[in-house]
């Protein structure tokens, strides 16, 4: 069974005279019990899709069910069973962590002792007890993010949406957030997150949909995506003066699928790295190219993105 | 949960947070209290005019200040809404099962509670300065002030949802504020005004509120001014609330 089913979802925005097609027909199934990642550059449509799935926006056309409830006809039921942590989090800065959580629990219909025990439980689980009585505006980025997560989990949702869960966090806080997401997943919550960080998608998600310009361009497990689409990467380190010569040498070889120049290196995309490596070294030797280093890399999700869209995700971020 | 218990939950939480910071209450009070301390004494030597009796300046002046309090506090309450919109607070609340209307009405209720507390504090200052008014007059005056407050809050929320920018909300409120106040006769009675200005003031709802407020303070409970004031303000407040909730449904529901 799928926790989310989407058919032909479209959304346009008007900005002045221009029409921006944020979603151009999304079809997607999210299986139950997984950490599912929507990976794509800023402006790809990830947040729009998430806002539609969380009932904050209405799609122009298309159908979607979330945890078995239709978005169009049963949005109130959808809201009861999902949690949502937006990019900005949405905690009230002037209220304390405990006040934010208690209020959220009451909005989900909890009362009295029920509120207190659930809030205590969450404060303990996310190690926020010592700062629970302080206004949120005094929290560090990592503390605030943990509170945001707690706010999304108050009612034990069947499905939790996380929009860019680790954006702007230091590495330690980031790892901490990942741990919390994994723990939540282990307890049986389905998780859908958006990210434009490759390492986050790679480290956290069991399944990924790559989204670009309002369309899903690929979908599989991280390993499957890399295996199917990108092949392996051989990176030859050599002086800039020899990069051109090396490129000419390899451009005529049929087993090389793609060549890309990099500073003091040449990047070769091949189907099977282990088999290609001896042939590459042989060619290098015959031509007498002074290579300094050789590395065989499994492809990254960035390579996948590059293959699918012709652009690098990293370029988009800069 | 029904709408009222939802509004209650939102309002109770929001009031608790708002009152943590005493500046919430003090800022709006500073201006009318300064007028009372530094301007009202001048009126004691004014010749008898409608609503102004010599020697009892504070009795004639406090009703105007109570009316002033509502716009200078509540006309700016939409700014908080814009901030919550931008920081994702409203989105978080909109994803919960609570009615989206209850979220806005609960926040409006918080702004009314702040206004009421300011009104009571203002009356205490006036009382210390020698105010002499009946209990019925006070209850009626605070009730009327709350209706004006509801009008101002609705208008401010409507602007906030339309403009979505706190600077724009602040500017438009400031532009509206001064003519609204000056053309209401809340500092000096409009009997002093030239004819054209009185005609314009006839179009200002706050002018009727001020008349009603003065009558309440003077104990003239049979006066038609009281009925007029309540009627004009209540009708406008209902229209304002309708506009604000409609903008809310369009923008966020």
Image (tube, coloured by chain):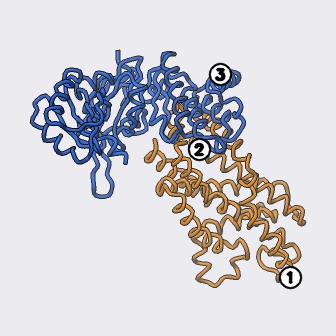
Say which chain tag 1 marks: B
Looking at the image, do the residues carrying marks 2 and 1 touch, with CB atoms under 8 Å apart?
Answer: no
* Quarter of the figure with the N terminus of chain A: top left
Q: Residue A79, position in %: x, y? A: 47, 29
- Dot 3: within a 10 Å radius of its alpha carbon, few (fewer than 14), some, or many (20 or more) residues? some
Find the distance from the CA under tag 1 to the CA under tag 3. 67 Å
- Is residue B45 at all visible to an observer of this figure? yes
Answer above or below: position of A125 versus B224.
above
- Mark 2: secondary structure: helix
Give the number of the disc on residue B105: 2
Chain letter for the orange part: B
Measure the C-alpha gap from mark 2 to mark 1.
45 Å
Residue behind mark 1: B45
Name the residue beneath numbered marker 3.
A121
Q: Nearer the viewer, mark 2 or mark 1?
A: 2
Label 2 close to label 3 by CB (< 8 Å): no
Q: Nearer the viewer, residue A249 or B223?
A: A249
Q: Nearer the viewer, mark 1 or mark 3?
A: 3
Position in image of residue B187 (x %, y %): 73, 74
Frontmost residue, B180 versus B191: B180
Q: Which of disc 1 and disc 2 is earlier in sequence?
A: 1
């Amino acid at each position: 069974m799928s926790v989310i089913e989407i058919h032909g979802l479209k959304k346009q925005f008007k900005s002045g005279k221009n029409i921006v097609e944020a979603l151009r027909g999304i079809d997607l199934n999210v299986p139950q019990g997984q950490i599912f990642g929507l990976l794509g550059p800023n402006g790809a449509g990830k947040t729009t899709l998430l806002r539609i799935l969380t009932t904050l926006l209405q799609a122009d056309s298309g159908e979607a069910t979330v945890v078995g409830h239709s978005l169009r006809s049963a949005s109130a039921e959808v809201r009861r069973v999902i949690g949502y942590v937006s990019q900005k989090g949405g905690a009230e800065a002037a209220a304390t962590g405990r006040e934010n959580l208690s209020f959220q629990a009451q909005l989900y219909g909890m009362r009295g002792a029920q509120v207190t025990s659930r809030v205590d439980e969450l404060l303990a689980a996310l190690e926020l007890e010592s700062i629970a009585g302080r206004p949120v505006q005094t929290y560090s980025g990592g503390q605030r993010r943990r509170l945001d997560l707690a706010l999304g989990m108050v009612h034990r949702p069947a499905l939790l949406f996380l929009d860019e869960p680790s954006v702007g966090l230091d590495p330690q806080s980031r790892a901490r957030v990942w741990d919390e997401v994994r723990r939540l997943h282990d307890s049986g919550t389905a998780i859908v997150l958006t990210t434009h960080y490759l390492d986050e998608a790679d480290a956290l998600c069991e399944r990924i949909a790559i989204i670009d310009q309002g369309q899903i361009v690929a979908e599989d497990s991280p390993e499957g995506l890399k295996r199917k689409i990108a092949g392996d990467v051989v990176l030859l380190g050599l002086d800039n003066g020899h990069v051109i010569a090396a490129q000419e040498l390899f451009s005529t070889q049929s087993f090389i699928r793609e060549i890309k120049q990099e500073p003091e290196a040449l990047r070769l995309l091949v189907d099977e790295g282990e088999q290609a490596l001896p042939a590459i070294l042989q060619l290098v030797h015959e031509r007498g190219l002074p290579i300094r280093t050789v590395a065989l890399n499994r492809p990254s999700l960035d390579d996948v993105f590059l293959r699918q869209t012709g652009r690098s995700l990293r370029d988009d971020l800069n | 949960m029904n709408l009222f218990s939802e509004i209650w939950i939102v309002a109770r939480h929001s009031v608790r947070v708002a009152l943590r910071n005493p500046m919430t209450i003090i800022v709006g009070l500073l201006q009318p209290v300064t007028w009372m301390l530094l301007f009202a004494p001048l009126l004691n030597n004014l010749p008898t005019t409608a609503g102004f009796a010599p020697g009892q300046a504070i009795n004639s002046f406090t009703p105007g200040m109570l009316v002033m309090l509502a716009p200078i506090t509540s006309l700016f309450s939409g700014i908080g809404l814009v901030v919550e919109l931008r920081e994702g607070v409203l989105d978080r609340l909109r994803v919960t099962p609570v009615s989206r209307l209850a979220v806005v009405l609960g926040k409006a209720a918080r702004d009314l509670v702040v206004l009421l507390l300011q009104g009571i504090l203002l009356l205490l200052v006036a009382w210390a300065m020698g105010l002499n008014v009946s209990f019925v007059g006070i209850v009626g005056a605070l009730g009327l002030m709350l209706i004006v407050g509801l009008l101002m809050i609705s208008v401010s929320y409507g602007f906030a949802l339309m403009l979505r920018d706190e600077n724009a909300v602040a500017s438009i409120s400031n532009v509206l504020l001064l003519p609204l106040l000056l053309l209401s006769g809340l500092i000096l009675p409009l009997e002093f005004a030239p004819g054209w200005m009185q005609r314009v003031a006839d179009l200002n709802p706050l002018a009727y509120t001020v008349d009603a407020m003065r009558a309440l303070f003077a104990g003239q409970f049979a006066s038609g001014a009281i009925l007029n004031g309540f009627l004009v303000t209540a009708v406008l407040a209902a229209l304002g609330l309708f506009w604000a909730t409609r903008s809310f449904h369009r923008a966020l529901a």
